[in-house]
Amino acid sequence: MRHRLGFGVHSPFAFRFVRDIVQPPRGCGYYSSFRLRRLLAPLPSGLRKEYALLFRLAARLHPRAIYLQDCTDDRLDDALHLGCTSVKCRHRLPKHDVTDALIICAAAGMDCERAAALLNSGNILVLRDLHGNPSLLQSAVEAMPGGWTFEDTRLAILVSSPNEPLNRLSIKLI
């Protein structure tokens, strides 16, 4: 709970990540927040929270590309587009190395070697449904050149940055 409010987080990037993306202050509004709430209203609470988190992630970090794998819900695509209007979501992983991309996939659909390659290129990797491949998170973290991990029981966000030491944070994301 303390980390979710930003207490005890010593990295400036991680503090801003927690305060702006994971747990924004009450009353903090993002552009398109009203449209996002209306888009996500029919979804169950857990999915609404997850999609809103991913929306804030795209809106704050402004990736050059967004890749969705193993996601058939158009509302996630629409939510990400609301957060980052200049980028279209692609529904397959890149065949070549990309940089500064947001990659969202189910843990069961990702293999360790591909996760390592994506993280070595300086990307943001979001692993959903970690129960589907519990060893993937540990393998991906070991392969990271540096950066930050924000880990929950169901979801993990890995932000690769080769110029930074590896910082792991266990935090309630959704």
Image (cartoon, rainbow, N blue to C red):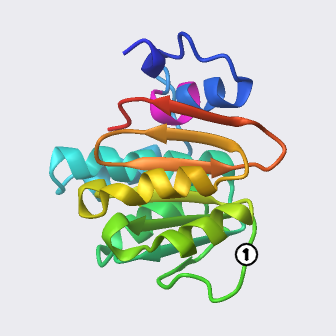
Seen from the viewer's position, the closer of residues 116 and 2 is: 116
Q: Residue furthest bottom?
A: 95
Q: Nearer the viewer, residue 15 or 167?
A: 167
> Does residue 105 appear to the left or right of 15 in the view shown?
left
| For residue 158, side relative to residue 48 (left or right) | right
Residue shown at the point (35%, 30%) measured from the top left: 172
**What's the magenta region?**
19-23
User: Mark 1: which secondary structure?
Assistant: loop
User: Is residue 79 something one can see in this rendering?
Assistant: yes
Camera-nearest residue between 43 and 12: 12
Q: For the point 63% across and 89% down, which residue is it?
A: 95
Quadrant in which the N terminus is drawn:
top left
Residue 26 seen in this snapshot: no
- Residue where numbered disc 1 is placed: 98
Residue 97 found in image quarter: bottom right
Amino acid type, callout 1: Val
Q: Residue at x 43, y 45 (%)?
A: 53
Of residues 95 and 82, the one drawn nearer to the viewer in this rendering: 95
How far across and how far down the image is residue 80, in percent?
49, 62
Where is the C terminus found, in terms of image quarters?
A: top left
Near mark 1 (Cα within 10 A), the count class, few <14, some 14-19 or many ≥20, is: some
- Residue 70 is situated, as x and y percent measured from the top left of the image, at 35, 77
- Magenta region's main secondary structure? helix
Picture mark count? 1
- Is 125 one of the magenta-colored residues? no
Q: Quadrant of residue 74?
A: bottom left
> Relative to 92, is 141 above or below?
above
Q: Can you give x and y, in whole percent of width and height, for residue 50 in the image?
A: 33, 49
- Position above or below: 7 against 137: above
Residue 126 is situated, as x and y percent measured from the top left of the image, at 48, 57
Q: Is residue 7 above or below residue 60?
A: above
Residue at (47, 65) in percent of width and height: 104
